[in-house]
Image (cartoon, rainbow, N blue to C red):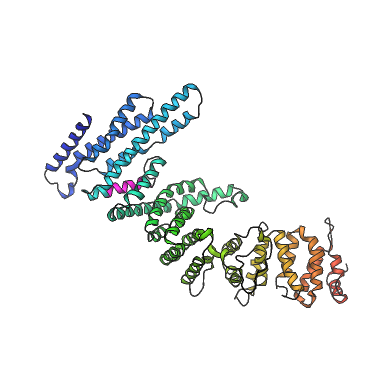
Amino acid sequence: GRASLSNSVLNEAYVQGCSASPPAPSDEGDHTWKYDTSLSVFVGSVVHASERCNDKPADAERKRVATDTASTLQNELGILPYLDSQALSFVTAMGDLDEITKKAAEAARKTSQQTIAASAALNAAKQAAEKRANTALLVLRDACLQRTNKEGRKSAIRIAVLLASGQLNASPSCEDKALKLVINMLYPRSEAIADAVVEAATNELKEIAKYAQDSYAMIQKANRETKEKENTSETSHRSPFAPDSDEEKEAMDRARKPILLFMALCIRRPELIKTLFELCSVDKGDVLSKTVRQQMPKLARAVGLKHGPAEIALKVADATTRQETPLLLTFLDALAPLGEKNMVSQEFIDACYEIQESKADGGRKNPRFLIPVIFAIKRVDLIPKLPGFVDADDDVFMTALKKMSERLGRQVLIFRDEPDQEEPSLKGMTHCEQLVYLHKMDFEAAGLPQRRYLDAIRMCLDNEEVFNDRVVMSALDHMSGTFLTGEDPLPLAFMRSVILVCSKHESLHGWICHTLLPRLIEGKIWQDKRQFEGWMRCAKMLETSGDTGVSSKEAIEKLPPEQLAIYQARYGGS
């Protein structure tokens, strides 16, 4: 019948090619043109029949032809001498189910009696199309596993990788099945096939990296234009890995599946993470790096559970360069929660310390390597590390503060007391504690300029969403309380911060006038000339009540006569 006829034609074409005179080197491949052409025509006719059926799923004749040709395709191709890459590419076109899926979905939304019958017919046609797509995958699988033609097998594996990477014209469901075929069936089959899969996936990642570089200028322009149109408040809560424009989204969508495929290979060969980071850190490949960081939790969780978070962290860090540091940091951040009960293990914390040591540049340690575990480090150990974060970039500093309090919930508003002073156990640092310890920091001993010390505190106070009036009041209350008891002197920036708070938090004016300023008098703040100057400036700011009804006059009147005279001489009578 039809099957025997097609095989007869293809076999005859192959025999004629083999019996032809050996070609000249410049004509290599010419002797197989009959077979290759006949094969392309045959496979193309099967694919065309499938496409015609999808186009008109209610046509019984088209459905019969598509079913008949597809049902025997795997057996027919399986007995042929070889399959070239063009024929296999044609076969994968049977995986394009978008049109038939769309039609079935539209019919399912309609409710009339007539459309219910049409919907059932379309659903049956969709299932038949899916079956034909599965046949295409089986053909591809057989071609990848055949042993007689190594080059043909390599070509088939390349096409399977392209399909799994979303680079061929196929539906998402077919691409997902192709991904499972490549990872779960082909890769474990043999070392030779695994190497071919890795080679094809690496080449595809290189192509995506080139695409990202070529698209860089266009994407950057689109991102700038989108940013100019958007409201800043709308983007402030958006994920840093979310696309900033439609153009960037399109590029990230194109890069996502090749990256996910390569990540799946990284789970089986962790040394490939180095290749992933290297290729995705190329100059002007920002969209690629962003896509990898977006998908990093999937990779980190899988390799962390399989190889151990600390072990894989050290292995990957050892292989990465400075240019790949942003990806390494995202990787560490995603590895951190993989300890028992979602807590960071001490082993992983030690690994981050070790990585920080190994990545030190001229003895200067990068504090960013501790941020992934900073919420799990004991507060007593964080205090001496604060100057390192203050000395870093503003973004690093603020990210560190945010991460320190990540798991403290409602406690972020208070200053916690150690349950046992002999055995400190508190972890992380609340927002209140951050303000307190930033004020108390010995910036000179840490080698920090005073300006940077003051700027760090100002940045916190400027972030009123995080360091709100309750946090600020709690921090000032704690520092003034320890000053009153004689436990600690007032930090250098204390009164400067109080003055800043007066201008930012009107709701605290009453507390400052009736509690804080009198408490500072009780602690004899005038004994420190600089602090007393700040006290007087603050009192003068709040002396005139205006519309609030709050005034510092009562606090001013509590000054001893000598200090009251100094205030009146400096700022006038009250």
The answer to which quarter of the image holds residue 268 is bottom left
Horizontal arrangement in the rendering, residue 509 relative to residue 378 (left or right): right
Q: How many labels does the image show?
A: 0
Residue 238 position within the rendered picture, expressed as x and y whole percent measured from the top left? 57, 51
Q: In which quarter of the image is the N terminus?
A: top left
Q: Quadrant of residue 395?
A: bottom right
For the residue pair 97 and 225, the one nearer the viewer reads as 97
- Residue 68 percent coordinates (x, y): 29, 30
Please state which of residues 343 and 221 is positioned toward the viewer in this rendering: 343
As drawn, 51 above or below 568? above
Image height of 422 relative to 435, above or below? below
Identity of the residue furthest to the top in this view: 114
**Residue 74 versus residue 494: which sits nearer the camera?**
74
Q: Is residue 161 magenta?
A: yes
Q: Can residue 140 be seen in this view?
A: yes
**Residue 295, percent across and down?**
47, 53
Magenta span: predominant SS is: helix
Using the image as rendered, state which of residue 58 and residue 572 is in the foreground: 58
Can residue 282 be spotted in the picture? no
Residue numbers of the magenta segment: 154-166
Q: Is residue 492 above or below residue 37?
A: below
Judged left or right of residue 538, residue 270 is: left
- Which residue is pictured at 80% across the width and 65% down the height? 515
Residue 129 in picture, x, y percent from top left: 37, 33
Quarter of the figure with the C terminus: bottom right
Let me know if residue 93 is in the magenta part: no
